Amino acid sequence: MVQTNTYKTDSNNLYRLMEDGKISTNYLMKHLITNYNPQKNINENNANNSDPSVEDILDELNQLIGLDSVKKLINEIIAYSEIQSRRKLEGLRIDSLVMHMIFRGNPGTGKTTVARLLGKLYKAMGILEKGHLIEIERADLVGEYIGHTAIKVKEQVKNAIGGILFIDEAYSLSRGGNRDFGKEAIDALVKAMEDNRKNLILILAGYNDEMEAFIGSNPGLRSRFPIEIVFQDYSIEELIKIAELMVEKREYKLSKSAKSKLFNILSLKRRQDGNHSGNARLVRNLIEKSIRKQAVRLKDSSIYSREDLITLTRQDFMDGE
Ligand SMILES: Nc1ncnc2c1ncn2[C@@H]1O[C@H](COP(=O)(O)OP(=O)(O)OP(=O)(O)O)[C@@H](O)[C@H]1O
Ligand SMILES: [Mg+2]
């Protein structure tokens, strides 16, 4: 058993204490998941008091609309860490979980949002030191002459150490065939993953089919990226809920007619552009545009109330006015 004063520590340190076998997983669970109170999570010894706790991050995750498979996976990761530590206490063999991942999904399905949250979660759990997200694409990794690619990859890996290196449209790394430096970038990344096993997580992201082909054509990648998450397109109902969440965060609200107008716009876009219609990204763009239109509308009318300042109306979602 540990001393009472150790109990005052924050979630980061609790995870480390559990890893070292100094506190039990039951104790940790009780504190972090059930009885945890962020207000009490103040540790005089820790300079980063503003860092969110595991509980804060789980709350943030649960606020996201849909994304059931992501929520399930994150619960599995937490449970897995728990059980591994418990096994360690019992002297049983433990394997560390390989955290590198593949995210497959259309634009605007929440890939970047989830990657950022995972970074914060891993930091709070003590898995990653910093938990920041470095989001890059092909041009940041692939050089133009011999030796250039190695330098570029090294630089990006250096920036990402302690956090997550997120490679968007990763399939484009194998685009140029044998004479392209993309292959060299993949090899250098694989080496970096192995050299920095404990303090770097790689996420390869991209559209469904392209990612499938990319992984299929690079044997060895699948086993190195054992966790694969498919981000489904949101239904129109989910997109409306996302819109409501977005406006609420900005202290606005949608009028009933604005909501039905938005529903129509989203349905039409889905019919026209299918899976590439933009999902939650399209919603964000529409909301931001409507906020600008509302501002002009109110400015033009001489009198407006507090309610008017909050409400986005159907008019604010009309095109070309
Ligand atoms: N499930 C969700 N609930 C609430 N907001 C969401 C959700 N998914 C995405 N968003 C919001 O939608 C916007 C776009 O999401 P994000 O950038 O994570 O998508 P993405 O899959 O990375 O897109 P892209 O492929 O275009 O980079 C962000 O503002 C994000 O906060
Ligand atoms: Mg993104």
Image (spheres, rainbow, N blue to C red):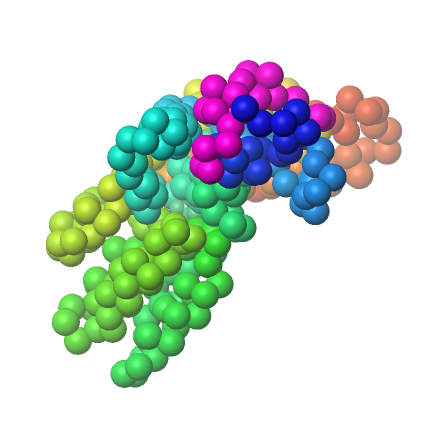
**For the stretch drawn in magenta, what is the main secondary structure?**
helix
| Magenta range | 19-40
Q: Is 30 one of the magenta-colored residues? A: yes
Q: Nearer the viewer, residue 128 or 307?
A: 128
Q: Quadrant of residue 314?
A: top right
In the rendered view, does 269 fall on the left or right side of 2? left
**In this rendering, is residue 83 above or below 183?**
above
Where on the picture, by quarter, is residue 288?
Answer: top right
The quarter of the picture where the C terminus appears is: top right
Q: Residue 52 appears at what percent x and percent y?
A: 61, 36
Q: Is residue 256 above or below residue 88?
A: above
Taking the spot 60% from the left edge, 16% from the top edge, the residue there is 35
Q: Position of residue 86 (x, y in %)?
A: 38, 27
Is residue 242 shown left or right of residue 93?
right
Given residues 175 and 164, the one toward you in this image is: 164
Q: Residue at x 80, y 39 (%)?
A: 299
Using the rendered image of the protein, determine whether residue 59 is visible from the camera's viewpoint: no
Quarter of the image with the N terminus in it:
top right
Lateral position of residue 3 relative to residue 23, left or right: right
User: How many numbered tags mark residues here?
Assistant: 0
214 relative position to 5: left or right = left
Foreground pick, 59 / 294:
59
Residue 175 in the image: above or below residue 165 = below
Seen at 48% across and 54% down, the residue is 162
Residue 151 magenta-drawn?
Answer: no
Residue 21 coordinates in the image, percent (x, y) = 45, 33
Whether residue 16 is visible, yes or no, is yes
Farthest residue to the right: give it: 303
Q: Position of residue 79 (x, y in %)?
A: 39, 26
Write the residue at 83% across / 27% down: 304
